[in-house]
Amino acid sequence: MAASRTQGDRLTDTTNSDRQHILTNHKSMQPTITIPKHWEYPRFALNQRTQQGIILGLHYYPTGTELAEQFGHGWRYALMDRKNSDELFHFEENQIQTLSPEELVSQITAEIEFYQYQTAILQQQLAAIRGGSPNA
């Protein structure tokens, strides 16, 4: 099984004696997700940005279960299409499209600029309260 990369922490797939995949976070070296060996490996990671939104959850319908009989086996993902949305949207794995590196850079840059602007506003408010400069 190949290693999986997320947008941020690097995850590595290892197999333990119970025939499970354990995704390990290399920053903390703590197991983050355990997946039974007979399940397929998820294509997308939690918090991954996609064309449909940001992945907030995932669940698996194993082969031979009632849910898999009704809806097909495999991974399903819960996504939020906007940062401040109050709705979750559910997609099958084959319905999700990744963002290009350029789209990722554009989204992340826009978010950084937004938060920098919000920080500047808060610093001005603090300065007004303190009666001085923003760094007082």
Image (cartoon, rainbow, N blue to C red):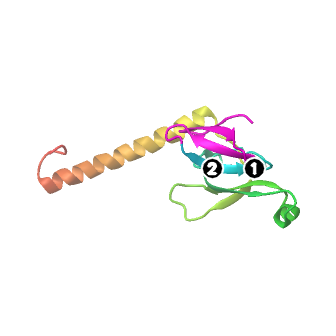
Q: Is residue 11 above or below residue 82?
A: above
Left or right, residue 99 beside residue 117 = right
| Label 2 environment density (alpha carbons within 10 Å; few <14, some 14–19, many ≥20) | few
Left or right, residue 31 beside residue 65 = left
Label 2 or label 1, whichever lies nearer to me, is 2
Q: Find disc 2 in the rendering and name its residue.
A: 33
* Residue in view at x 17 percent, y 54 percent: 128
* Residue in view at x 24 percent, y 48 percent: 123
Label 2 SS: strand
Q: Nearer the viewer, residue 92 or 74?
A: 74
What are the residue bounds of the magenta stretch?
Answer: 1-29
Left or right, residue 89 beside residue 117 = right
| Label 1 environment density (alpha carbons within 10 Å; few <14, some 14–19, many ≥20) | some
Q: Find disc 1 in the rendering and name its residue.
A: 93
Q: Nearer the viewer, residue 119 or 72?
A: 72
Q: Position of residue 77 (x, y in %)?
A: 69, 55
